[in-house]
Amino acid sequence: MREGLLEIFQETYRALRPASSIPELKIEFFAFANVNNTIRLRNGRLLVRLSDLLEGAPDAVLRAIAHILLAKIYRLPIDRGQAARYRKYVASHEIVRKTHLVRQMRGRKRLLSARGHFYDLEAIFEELNTRFFHGLMARPRLSWSPTKTRRILGHYDPAHNAIIISRIFDHPAMPRYVLEYVLYHEMLHLKHPVRMRGSRRCVHSAEFQEEEKRFPRVAEAEGFLKRL
Ligand SMILES: [Zn+2]
């Protein structure tokens, strides 16, 4: 674990709940498909999972996310400054990370293909298109990522109308429904473009999330992705 992270959470806890003793804390970094941070209270123990996107974040950003998560679980008001600090970091870094992948893809001399060794993205796209979108979705460029990245499982690049899926899914041991779920998520990005809500980018809107739940075995797929 990153040095000082536990202390950051403990100090934040003390500031938020000065009268209560600090529970045992377990903090892990996770390669979520998207920026995601979770907190749970189990048997008096706090379990925190942070997106690996925050692994290299400055202390101030980690303090912000500690504040947000702890305030959330204890139903305390979230400080606006902390919320803004966190959002700003994530917005800029998510873009950097995705830009890197797209650049990597374009920098390749050979043309990347939708056809992998085991799975054909175009065939799966058309199947999902029929199952969930009445076959109405225009097919974007589809490509496997050049490397087996775990950092980005899938990405929709609106500028180039392309969906890129990590090559780790092109494997015989990979259940098809997991790949379908990742591609389905990116297809929803095509259907629900990023909106601005005030100064905030709304990437996974309520409608997006509602529609994502229509995928059968969504919990199972999420569980599989978390263990990747
Ligand atoms: Zn997404």
Image (cartoon, rainbow, N blue to C red):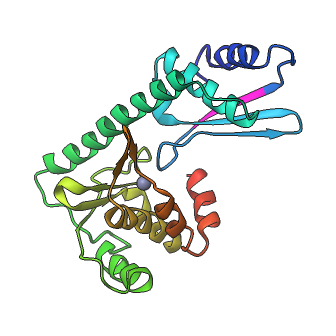
Count of picture labels:
0
Q: Nearer the viewer, residue 203 or 110?
A: 203
Query: In the visual, does 34 lie left or right of 156?
Result: right
Q: Residue at x 36, y 33 (%)?
A: 93
Task: State the residue at coordinates (57%, 28%).
Answer: 65
Query: What range of the chain is rendered magenta?
Result: 25-29
Up the image or down, 60 lies above or below 227; here it is above
Residue 131: image x %, image y %? 44, 85
The relative height of residue 25 versus residue 32 in the rendered view (above or below) is above
- Asked whether residue 174 appears in the rendered view, the answer is no
Q: In which quadrant of the rendered view does residue 19 lie?
A: top right
Secondary structure mostly seen in magenta is strand
Q: Quadrant of ligand 1?
A: bottom left
Q: Which residue is located at x 46 percent, y 27 percent?
A: 84
- Give the x, y percent position of residue 161: 20, 61
**Can residue 190 be seen?**
yes
Instruction: Tell me what residue is drawn at x 52 percent, y 29 percent.
Output: 83
Indicate whether residue 30 is drawn in magenta. Answer: no
**At which x and y percent is residue 47?**
74, 36
- Relative to 139, is 146 above or below? above
